[in-house]
Image (cartoon, rainbow, N blue to C red):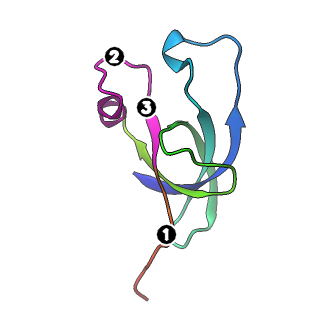
Amino acid sequence: MFTGRVIGTIDSTINHPWYDAKKLLIVEKSDHTGQATGDYVIAVDTVDAGVGEPVLVLDEGNGARQIFASTDAPVRSVVVGIIDEIHCPS
């Protein structure tokens, strides 16, 4: 899992049928202080996150497939939470 910020969405007219009616988000990864790392993933949204929101991403294929109760879904990354606050001891 990692934290990140939604920086965009992806729309497609032709895609694998499994992606029909699913929202794809571009999520820029963040470090433990919330600063962008410059790396990103494309993740399936399960929490109705929007551009600019900080999110929690599950980035592991088997776990992602479990979210959708599928053994063969073509998915690796899933947005599983919208972050309200992060607390790091100093």
Extent of the magenta region = 61-80
Which quadrant holds the C terminus? bottom left
Query: Can you say whether 3 is above or below 20 in the image?
Result: below
The residue that mark 3 highlights is: 76
Q: Is residue 18 left or right of residue 7?
A: left
Amino acid type of the residue that numbered disc 2 sits on in the rendered structure: Asp
The residue tagged with tag 3: helix, strand or loop?
A: loop
The residue tagged with tag 2: helix, strand or loop?
A: loop
Query: Can you say whether 86 is above or below 13 in the image?
Result: below
The residue that mark 1 highlights is: 32
Amino acid type of the residue that numbered disc 3 sits on in the rendered structure: Arg
Residue 49 versus residue 71: which sits nearer the camera?
49
Q: Residue at x 71, y 26 (%)?
A: 11
Identify the mark nearer the N-term, 1 or 2.
1
Q: Residue at x 50, y 62 (%)?
A: 83
Label 1, label 2: how far apart the Cα atoms are: 32 Å
The residue that mark 2 highlights is: 72
Label 1 Cα neighbours within 10 Å, binned few <14 / some 14-19 / many ≥20: few
Label 1, label 3: how far apart the Cα atoms are: 22 Å
**Which label belongs to residue 78?**
none
Q: Is residue 76 left or right of residue 29?
A: left
The residue tagged with tag 1: helix, strand or loop?
A: loop
Q: Which is in the foreground here, disc 1 or disc 2?
A: 2
